[in-house]
Image: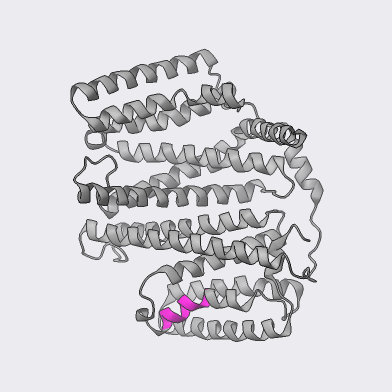
């Protein structure tokens, strides 16, 4: 029980039950009023929140078992504020604090009631990622509805740049809220860990499921499955390196710092796999590394005006980059899953986690592009990351999602090999440290 601090989110006390049910009944009333007044989006949201809060009580058939009342209050505040008036909140941070709290409760209930096993640190990471991902997905869905059926959720007649600035501010609010929630929940788990162990007991999980899943032989590396020889992969890498050298010289000749610096940076990245292998004995699959380098290589080509002259080049680059981020996220989390008994993520949950992970990464990338643009304007520098309005931002996120879907639906089955090798490397590194 001590290792599973997520269980401390449930309380079985008279005082907590009374306060929690008071807040919950207020949410039920607001849900009813939202539906009566035609505010269906907020009605559905508050109904979803009620279901999440009630799930433990229904599962245990005990109405006194509830999450802490102050977490329920955090979830309810934006819903109450929206029902009374938007002027109560001067920013969207409370909304995203609410989303972060919902994400924490969802993470805890996934841990309680499914075969998923997660420690409190992974739960906090999950909260942060989910907060950013929901922000990105919410704005993306609104934009898709605007351009396809003519609604005006985002595209309301203002300029593309004005709307984009507002959405970027929303993304930054989500980031701040996710960080704040992570820090608060980290402190909460640490302080609760010193208290008396919770008396609530959960049905035992099938521990054999974890051992069976992690001990099966992983699929072969991708390049073997595709019948591509290591020699051909090496040749492709050399061709890209030669192209990058030509781009670097062209950038110097044209006195174009952006082209030259992009080429130099990507050229240096191509040597990273060999350095990591020789110095740290970290394994890699040649095809996966070529896949990753191809993404940054295409970005370097984009600096040669490909973004402006080749249709959908930017979209293709985003989809490829997102697939690389999804693959990296899968490999790392899967390796940790294999290495430690504290974490177990079955394939269905991994599918969801990859999508959330890439959407969160996409939000962070768009924030960086926005801040870079602001810095370029303020200091009169040459632009190297550029946004062209809300439609450009949302298209980038849409193709990020497509790249993540491709990896989540197909690629994960063929990424296990490197995850197993990385897990063995982590185990060997941990053993060597314990011997010292």
Residue at left 48%, top 40%?
Answer: 325
Q: Is residue 366 left or right of residue 47?
A: left
Q: Is residue 377 left or right of residue 88?
A: left
Task: Name the quarter where the N terminus is drawn.
Answer: bottom right
Task: Name the quarter where the C terminus is drawn.
Answer: top right
Q: How far from the left and from the top, in percent, is residue 369?
A: 32, 47
Q: Is residue 33 left or right of residue 162?
A: right
Residue at left 21%, top 29%?
Answer: 256
Q: Is residue 340 placed above or below 415 in the rendered structure? A: below
Nearer to the camera, 281 or 435 = 435
Q: Main secondary structure of the magenta part?
A: helix
Q: Is residue 174 placed above or below 332 in the rendered structure? A: below
The verdict on residue 422 being magenta is: no
Residue 48 location, quadrant: bottom right
Q: How many marks?
A: 0
Q: How far from the left and from the top, in percent, is residue 358?
A: 48, 47
The verdict on residue 81 being magenta is: yes
For the record, the magenta segment spans: 75-83
Q: How far from the left and from the top, in percent, is residue 21?
A: 63, 84
Residue 214 location, quadrant: top right
Residue at left 67%, top 67%?
Answer: 191
Nearer to the camera, 41 or 390 = 390
Q: Is residue 328 placed above or below 75 in the rendered structure? A: above
Residue 167 location, quadrant: bottom left
Q: Residue furthest front?
A: 436
Specify how the rendered protein is coloured.
one colour
């Amino acid at each position: 029980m001590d290792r599973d601090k997520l269980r401390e989110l449930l309380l079985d006390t008279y005082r907590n039950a009374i306060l929690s049910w008071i807040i919950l009944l207020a949410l039920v009333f607001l849900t009813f009023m939202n539906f009566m007044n035609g505010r269906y989006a907020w009605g559905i949201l508050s109904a979803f929140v009620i279901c999440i809060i009630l799930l433990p009580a229904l599962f245990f058939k005990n109405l006194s078992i509830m999450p802490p009342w102050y977490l329920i209050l955090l979830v309810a505040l934006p819903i109450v504020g929206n029902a009374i008036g938007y002027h109560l909140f001067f920013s969207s941070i409370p909304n995203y604090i609410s989303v972060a709290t919902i994400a924490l409760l969802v993470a805890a209930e996934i841990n309680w009631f499914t075969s998923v096993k997660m420690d409190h640190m992974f739960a906090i990471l999950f909260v942060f990622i989910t907060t950013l991902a929901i922000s990105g997905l919410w704005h993306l869905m609104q934009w898709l509805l605007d351009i396809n059926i003519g609604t005006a959720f985002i595209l309301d007649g203002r300029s593309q740049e004005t709307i984009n600035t507002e959405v970027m501010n929303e993304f930054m609010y989500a980031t701040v809220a996710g960080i704040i929630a992570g820090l608060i929940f980290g402190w909460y788990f640490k302080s609760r860990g010193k208290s008396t162990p919770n008396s609530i007991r959960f049905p035992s999980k099938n521990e054999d499921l974890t051992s069976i899943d992690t001990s099966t032989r992983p699929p072969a590396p991708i390049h073997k499955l595709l019948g591509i020889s290591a020699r051909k992969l090496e040749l492709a890498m050399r061709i890209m390196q030669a192209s990058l050298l030509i781009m670097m010289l062209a950038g110097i000749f044209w006195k174009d710092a952006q082209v030259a610096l992009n080429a130099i940076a990507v050229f240096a990245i191509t040597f990273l796999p060999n350095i990591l292998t020789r110095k740290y004995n970290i394994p890699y699959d040649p095809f996966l590394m070529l896949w990753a380098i191809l993404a940054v290589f295409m970005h370097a080509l984009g600096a040669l005006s490909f973004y402006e002259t080749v249709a959908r080049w930017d979209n293709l680059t985003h989809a490829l980059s997102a697939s690389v981020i999804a693959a990296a996220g899968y490999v790392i989390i899967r390796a940790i899953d294999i290495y430690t008994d504290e974490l177990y993520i079955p394939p269905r949950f991994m599918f969801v986690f990859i999508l959330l992970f890439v959407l969160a990464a996409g939000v962070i990338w768009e924030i960086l592009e926005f801040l870079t643009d602001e810095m370029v304007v303020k200091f009169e520098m040459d632009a190297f990351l550029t946004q062209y309005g809300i439609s450009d931002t949302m298209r980038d996120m849409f193709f990020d999602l497509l790249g993540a879907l491709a990896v989540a639906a197909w690629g994960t089955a063929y990424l296990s090999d490197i995850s197993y090798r990385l897990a063995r490397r982590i185990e060997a590194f941990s053993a060597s440290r314990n011997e010292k």
